[in-house]
Image (spheres, rainbow, N blue to C red):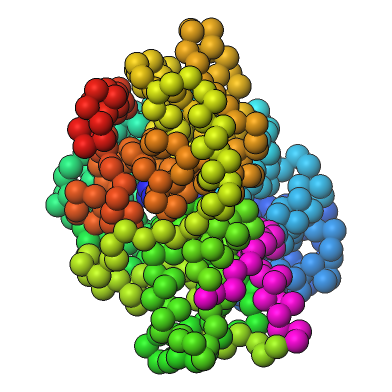
């Protein structure tokens, strides 16, 4: 996780706490009042008296935050009358509050089927769909709600958040603008507008809108949190930390608490407050975060404070994306040494990376992990370890790979020197050197320009428009090698039409990572933002030039990327920084062409 998310007010019928891309408070006061009115209406359609009484008790439990009891009473009510739509609506809200997203969706759908004209249910289901990343569904449901409730402030706000999460920034702004002309004193709308501009990389403007939200409501914790996350990349570290501390007491949902703790952990890592920061980073596994990883492994979690791993069988499970697995493999050798020859380390990583990691860590047994969505949750399991357990002893412990940092990296000085964390096949490296030798003369420059995942703030954080790379593409004495995964045909066609030659290897750049790593080694240099591809190059110890954001925590207050000390970094400015940093990359390439690598 490289960038903290913003928090908005994706609300359920009222300005209520919530977060970017996620649901709001399904138990807001206005929502409860509407449920009560629905219960009153239910009497007129001869609903069973016992079911109604149970649902009233369920709503009463929701009011005091006892969602377990509320769930039990809602289920009991539905046992009396399973055709009561309002009962399913109450149950859906309870399940959502308990982070049981799969059952919540089913309950909302049942409620909507039984009460098709109750647009409030569509609104709630739309919020949950957004929370789980089903943005197209969320958009349709919110539009349906607004058709029946035109000008509804919270629904407009929620829809703007969905549009933002789809990277439809102009649409989100145009939706918010007329509402702000009417509701100019609505801090929630100003905050949401700020999140849109923040995601778009317009940090100075976003800061202005967060400050307007705070002027209107000084106690608005979400706006203060969002301002903290803008102030830090703009260089105001002290202000960012103060804002975050002030925002924390105002967190009103378990999700907000987790999100704020995550942002604070990233800030602490950026300030090299370790190992405290790495310990705080454990919040990434908090089940209140929708993307938190769960692991299905028949073994206890390793507690380094109480469990000695010497001679034990320990499973390390990779987390999040490829770049994270590579970065946090920094500690694998430490664990292998601690386990010793009498024990065994097992490593579960992205399947496409198994061979690369196995060569780098021959003492470990490396296999692939798999992931499924269970009840809306990412659950990771490890088939190769399950097979091993059929004939050998079970694992003694398992540990998420990032959790090794708090154990083995207590200071910046404890990071190791240059080391390969993946090793490409030597035969493949030689093959690609031969293929590159067939190209025109010049430095072979492997090029990445964007992340494959371009949702939300990642678009501004990890990418510049391809046209901005033209100075690099036209560097005399260089031959550009396309290493960019995904469908970039439009970019390549535009380059060809402009007379720029970019060679694309005849491989699948997304899936053939053995070849991508080998080709990276064969290139004279690989450059681009800090995405999976540049991390592959850096982890293999290929010559790598990486563009990083000013608040990239991986620097740990140093002037280099501590995980890959040989990597040359180019820090871009927080606002409109891509043209300038691309200019510096071009100047560095020109110096190398003219005077060799020592001139870089």
The answer to which quarter of the image holds residue 596 is top left
Left-right relation of 555 to 486: left
Residue sitting nearer the eye, 375 or 78: 375
382 inside magenta stretch: yes
Query: Can residue 50 be seen?
Result: yes
Residue beneath the point at 36% across and 19% down = 477
The range drawn in magenta is 363-391
Rendering coords of residue 299 (x, y %): 60, 84
Counting from the top left corner in percent of width and height, residue 519 is at 52, 40
| Residue at 35%, 77% in the rendered image | 407
Between residue 115 and residue 341, name the one nearer to us. Answer: 341
Residue at 33%, 39% (x, y): give it.
545
In the rendered view, tell whether residue 561 sits above or below residue 166. below
Instruction: Give above or below for 582 relative to 31.
Output: above
Image x and y of residue 467, in percent: 43, 17
Task: Name the side, left or right, on which 129 lies relative to 516.
Answer: right
Q: Is residue 381 above or below residue 540?
A: below
> Position of 442 compared to 205: left or right?
right
**Rendered view: 544 above or below 71:** above
Quarter of the C terminus within the rendering: top left
Quarter where residue 251 is shown: bottom left
257 or 83, nearer to the observer: 257
């Amino acid at each position: 996780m490289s960038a903290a998310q913003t928090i908005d007010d994706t609300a359920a019928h009222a300005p209520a706490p919530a977060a970017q891309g996620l649901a709001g408070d399904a138990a807001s006061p206005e929502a409860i009042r509407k449920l009560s009115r629905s219960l009153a209406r239910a009497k007129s359609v001869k609903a069973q008296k016992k079911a109604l009484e149970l649902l009233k008790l369920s709503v009463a439990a929701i009011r005091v935050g006892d969602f377990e009891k509320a769930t039990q009473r809602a289920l009991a009510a539905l046992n009396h009358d399973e055709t009561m739509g309002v009962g399913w609506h109450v149950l859906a809200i309870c399940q959502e509050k308990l982070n049981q997203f799969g059952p919540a969706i089913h309950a909302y759908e049942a409620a909507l089927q039984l009460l098709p004209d109750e647009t409030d249910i569509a609104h709630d289901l739309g919020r949950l769909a957004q929370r789980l990343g089903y943005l197209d569904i969320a958009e349709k449901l919110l539009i349906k709600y607004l058709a029946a409730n035109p000008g509804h402030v919270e629904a407009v706000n929620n829809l703007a958040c969905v549009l933002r999460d789809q990277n439809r920034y102009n649409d989100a702004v145009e939706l918010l603008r007329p509402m702000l002309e009417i509701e100019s004193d609505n801090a929630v709308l100003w905050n949401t507008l700020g999140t849109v501009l923040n995601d778009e990389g317009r940090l100075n403007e976003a800061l202005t809108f967060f400050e307007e939200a705070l002027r209107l409501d000084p106690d608005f914790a979400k706006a203060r949190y969002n301002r903290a996350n803008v102030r830090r990349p703009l260089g105001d570290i002290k202000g960012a930390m103060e804002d975050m501390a002030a925002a924390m007491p105002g967190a009103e949902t378990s999700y907000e608490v987790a999100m704020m703790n995550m942002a604070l952990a990233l800030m602490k890592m950026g300030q090299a407050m370790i190992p405290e920061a790495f310990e705080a980073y454990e919040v990434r596994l908090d089940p209140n975060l929708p993307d938190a990883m769960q692991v299905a492994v028949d073994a206890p979690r390793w507690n380094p404070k109480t469990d000695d791993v010497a001679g034990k069988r320990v499973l390390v499970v990779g987390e999040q994306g490829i770049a994270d697995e590579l970065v946090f493999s920094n500690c694998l050798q430490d664990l292998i040494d601690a386990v010793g020859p009498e024990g065994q380390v097992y490593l579960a990583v992205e399947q496409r990376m198994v061979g690369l990691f196995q060569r780098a860590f021959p003492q470990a047994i490396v296999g692939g992990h798999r992931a499924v969505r269970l009840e809306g949750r990412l659950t990771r399991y490890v088939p190769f370890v399950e097979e091993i357990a059929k004939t050998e002893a079970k694992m003694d412990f398992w540990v998420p790979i990032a959790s090794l940092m708090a154990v083995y990296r207590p200071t910046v000085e404890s990071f190791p020197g240059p080391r390969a964390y993946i090793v490409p096949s030597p035969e493949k490296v030689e093959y690609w050197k031969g293929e590159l030798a067939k190209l025109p003369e010049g430095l072979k420059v492997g090029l990445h320009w964007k992340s494959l995942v371009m949702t939300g703030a990642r678009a501004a954080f990890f990418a510049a428009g391809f046209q901005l790379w033209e100075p690099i593409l036209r560097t005399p004495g260089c031959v550009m090698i396309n290493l960019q995964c995904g469908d970039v045909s439009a970019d390549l066609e535009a380059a060809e039409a402009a007379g720029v030659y970019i060679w694309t290897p005849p491989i699948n750049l997304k899936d053939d990572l053995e070849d991508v790593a080998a080709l990276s080694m064969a290139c004279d240099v690989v450059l681009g933002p800090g995405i999976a591809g540049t991390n592959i190059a850096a982890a293999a110890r290929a010559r790598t030039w990486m563009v990083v954001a000013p608040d990239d925590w991986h620097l740990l207050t140093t002037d280099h990327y501590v995980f890959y000390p040989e990597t040359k970094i180019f820090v871009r400015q927080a606002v409109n920084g891509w043209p300038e940093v691309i200019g510096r990359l071009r100047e560095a390439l020109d110096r190398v062409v003219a005077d060799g690598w020592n001139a870089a």
